[in-house]
């Protein structure tokens, strides 16, 4: 297929379904107020006035998740991080995406003024007229063209070609620049991943600041000039330089223009990173104030084990990362003097701790057992989740299989409860049936070769909470004749042993896709990705298009792959909902992974002056980007 950008006239829209055009789009915009901290720069001519900095049709924020808005501009907030790599948190917290989830997990345009979809294969994206990058340069479809032609399809920058999620059955999209504000992506078959990919915590960025990066691209600038202009005399050829500077997600290049609410001003490495307000930001409130409300966000580096103490003492105005429930009692006690508020949000994970029987294990006996559904069900029935909740999670969690959470529109109670109740009598019966009826003098079951049925669970967590949970499960499994040993190791070794089939069973966090909609990718519940700990070699085979791993050879798991294809080829929500329902039903019945509890609470420390942070919320990587789901650009400081 010839890869290039096409230019075409806009097609008639009578057959298009517009997806969420904001109700306020036609409403008159409020009279704009100049941001107090920018007044002097406007007076001096360093910046244009606010009505010249925002788009002609800005994003008007009328809903405030914390119920305390509109707010007031000004001030700075301090947060604690553990290293320079945490500059990426500001990409998550800014939550500036072409399309975003609202706090009810519905998709809506954000950076985009609107988008339109036909049959899930034809997509038109409309930008906001007058929208600018943080350095004041216009944000247009040229930035999309640059990414598509000069990065994604440049053999030096992208040797493997465009991201695999931009291909449908091996076909790349036809990309048309309609005009400077309108771009169209078209496939012959449905691409259900396209819209969702824009709203993720780590989105598939379709654009770049072309005016900046062209200075470091050999198509536009001689290589010798690139080498000279690279800041700090960076060594390497133009490809290496371009890659180092093109860090939209990592957010660690102060010179890279951004659309985020705050702009990094501190080059790493540093112990204190300053993010200042983006004067060209595209969101406003109903009072005509340009967001964000905070003038600055300061990220201060601290040791991870000191973050709870520092947050409790008031050294962070807004802290969620590097805190856990084990810190809650201390935080509440410290709050009495520091006056911070400690809120508890629900953590988004299918299971706080899940066990993954390796269906691709190298050991013949353990692979046979792991593939026997009676064995997997027995192990699940042998866990007393109520006891686990009370002893380890102080009663604040919900016993559950490793599945989606109640917040999801797809949730059914049986997904959480099936084979996930404590029933040692039935567990013992099932273990007898699978050929483990013989026991030694200590009551431990014997394998066919006479060895004790000892399951070595491998993990890479240093969490005392996880260690306590596994210790308690070990005591519970003794009652059904199974011995459990834990083998902690480095994350790298953990992954190598899992992917190679050396690990028999692993322990890790449960599914991340905890609050899906019908349009959310179900890949995490299907053997389609190497990261699936229970079937990594099958996932590797799918991801590598048969070049690595093993082809799925287990009927029930292969059925999930068929359902994934059914979901991918469906062109409406009803068809995708049907595929999702069946995928979740099979996972619940087959117990491919063993969940424990979910709904764990995440402490959120909020300073006494910080306003509009929800009292209760959902804290997860994706969807949401941790606190990003609630748009921290709408948080503000009282006087």
Image (tube, rainbow, N blue to C red):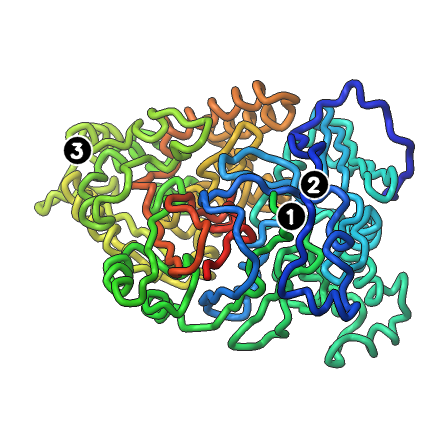
Q: Is residue 588 left or right of residue 375?
A: right
Q: Residue at x 23, y 62 (%)?
A: 333
Q: Is residue 471 left or right of residue 237?
A: left
Q: In this orientation, which residue lies closer to the viewer: 362 or 288?
A: 288
Q: Quadrant of the N terminus?
A: top right
Q: Position of residue 486 (x, y in %)?
A: 28, 55
- Residue 452 seen by the camera: no
Give the foreground label among 1 and 3.
1
Whether tag 2 and tag 1 are in contact, CB under 8 A, the answer is yes
Q: Is residue 350 above or below residue 46?
A: above
Q: Secondary structure at mark 3?
A: helix
Q: In this orientation, which residue lies closer to the viewer: 282 or 590?
A: 282
Q: Position of residue 172 (x, y in %)?
A: 77, 38
Q: Residue at x 41, y 24 (%)?
A: 585
Q: Residue at x 59, y 42 (%)?
A: 61
Give the foreground label among 2 and 3.
2
Q: Position of residue 462 (x, y in %)?
A: 34, 62
Earlier along the polypeptide chain: callout 1 or callout 3?
Answer: 1
Q: Secondary structure at mark 1?
A: loop
CA–CA distance in space, label 2 to label 1: 8 Å
**Residue farthest toward the bottom in the current orientation of the protein:** 233
- Residue 531 seen by the camera: yes
Q: Residues within 10 Å of mark 3 (few under 14, many from 20)?
A: many
Earlier along the polypeptide chain: callout 2 or callout 3?
Answer: 2
Q: Residues within 10 Å of mark 2 (few under 14, many from 20)?
A: some
CA–CA distance in space, label 1 to label 3: 63 Å
Quarter location, residue 137: bottom right
Q: Which residue is mark 1?
A: 288
Earlier along the polypeptide chain: callout 2 or callout 1?
Answer: 2
Q: Which residue is mark 2?
A: 29
Q: In this orientation, which residue lies closer to the viewer: 198 or 309?
A: 309
Q: Which residue is mark 3?
A: 424
């Amino acid at each position: 297929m010839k890869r290039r950008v096409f230019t075409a006239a806009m097609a008639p829209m009578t057959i298009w379904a517009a997806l969420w055009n904001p109700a306020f789009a036609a409403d008159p915009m409020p009279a704009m107020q100049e941001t107090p901290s920018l007044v002097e720069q406007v007076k001096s001519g360093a910046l244009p006035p606010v009505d010249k900095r925002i788009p002609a049709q800005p994003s008007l924020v009328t809903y405030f998740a914390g119920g305390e808005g509109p707010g007031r501009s000004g001030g700075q907030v301090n947060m604690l991080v553990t290293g320079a790599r945490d500059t990426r948190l500001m990409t998550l917290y800014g939550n500036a995406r072409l399309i975003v989830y609202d706090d009810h997990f519905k998709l809506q345009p954000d950076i985009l003024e609107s988008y339109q979809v036909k049959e899930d294969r034809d997509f038109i994206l409309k930008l906001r007229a007058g929208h600018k990058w943080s350095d004041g340069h216009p944000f247009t479809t040229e930035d999309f063209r640059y990414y598509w032609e000069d990065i994604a399809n440049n053999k030096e920058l992208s040797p493997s070609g465009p991201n695999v999620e931009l291909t449908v059955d091996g076909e790349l999209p036809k990309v048309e620049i309609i005009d400077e504000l309108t771009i169209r992506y078209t496939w012959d078959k449905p691409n259900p991943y396209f819209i969702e990919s824009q709203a993720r915590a780590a989105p598939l960025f379709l654009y770049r600041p072309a005016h900046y990066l062209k200075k470091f691209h050999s198509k536009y600038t001689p290589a010798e000039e690139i080498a000279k202009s690279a800041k700090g005399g960076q060594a390497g050829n133009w490809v290496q330089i371009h890659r180092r500077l093109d860090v939209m997600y990592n957010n660690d290049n102060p010179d890279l223009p951004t659309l985020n609410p705050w702009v990094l001003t501190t080059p790493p490495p540093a112990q204190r990173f300053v993010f200042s307000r983006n004067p060209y930001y595209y969101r406003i409130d109903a009072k005509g104030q340009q967001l964000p409300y905070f003038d600055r966000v300061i990220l201060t580096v601290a040791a991870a084990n000191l973050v709870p103490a520092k947050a409790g003492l008031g050294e962070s105005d807004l802290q969620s990362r590097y805190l856990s429930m084990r810190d809650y009692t201390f935080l509440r006690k410290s709050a009495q003097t520091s006056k911070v508020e400690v809120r508890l949000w629900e953590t988004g994970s299918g299971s706080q701790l899940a066990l993954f029987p390796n269906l691709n294990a190298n050991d013949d006996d353990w692979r046979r057992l792991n593939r026997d559904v009676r064995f997997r069900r027995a192990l699940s029935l042998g866990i007393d989740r109520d006891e686990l909740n009370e002893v380890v999670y102080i009663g604040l969690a919900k016993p559950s299989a490793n599945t989606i959470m109640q917040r999801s529109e797809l949730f059914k109670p049986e997904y959480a409860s099936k084979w996930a109740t404590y029933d040692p009598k039935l567990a013992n019966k099932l273990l007898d049936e699978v050929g483990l009826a013989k026991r030694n003098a200590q009551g431990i079951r014997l394998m066919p070769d006479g060895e004790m049925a000892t399951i070595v669970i491998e993990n890479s967590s240093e969490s005392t909470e996880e260690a306590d949970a596994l210790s308690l499960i070990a005591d519970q499994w003794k009652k059904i004749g199974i011995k459990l040993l834990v083998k902690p190791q480095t994350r790298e070794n953990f992954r190598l042993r899992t992917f190679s089939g050396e690990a028999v069973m692993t322990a890790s966090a449960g599914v991340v896709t905890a609050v899906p909609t019908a349009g959310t990718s179900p890949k995490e519940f299907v053997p389609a990705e190497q990261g699936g700990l229970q079937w990594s070699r099958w996932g590797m085979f799918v991801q590598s298009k048969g070049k690595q791993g093993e082809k799925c050879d287990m009927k029930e798991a292969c059925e999930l792959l068929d359902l994934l294809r059914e979901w991918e080829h469906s062109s409406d929500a009803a068809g995708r909902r049907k595929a999702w329902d069946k995928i979740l039903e099979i996972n619940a019945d087959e117990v491919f992974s063993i969940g424990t509890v979910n709904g764990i609470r995440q402490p959120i420390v909020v300073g006494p002056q910080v306003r509009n942070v929800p009292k209760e919320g959902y804290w997860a990587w994706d969807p949401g980007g941790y606190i990003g789901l609630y748009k921290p650009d709408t948080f503000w400081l009282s006087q």
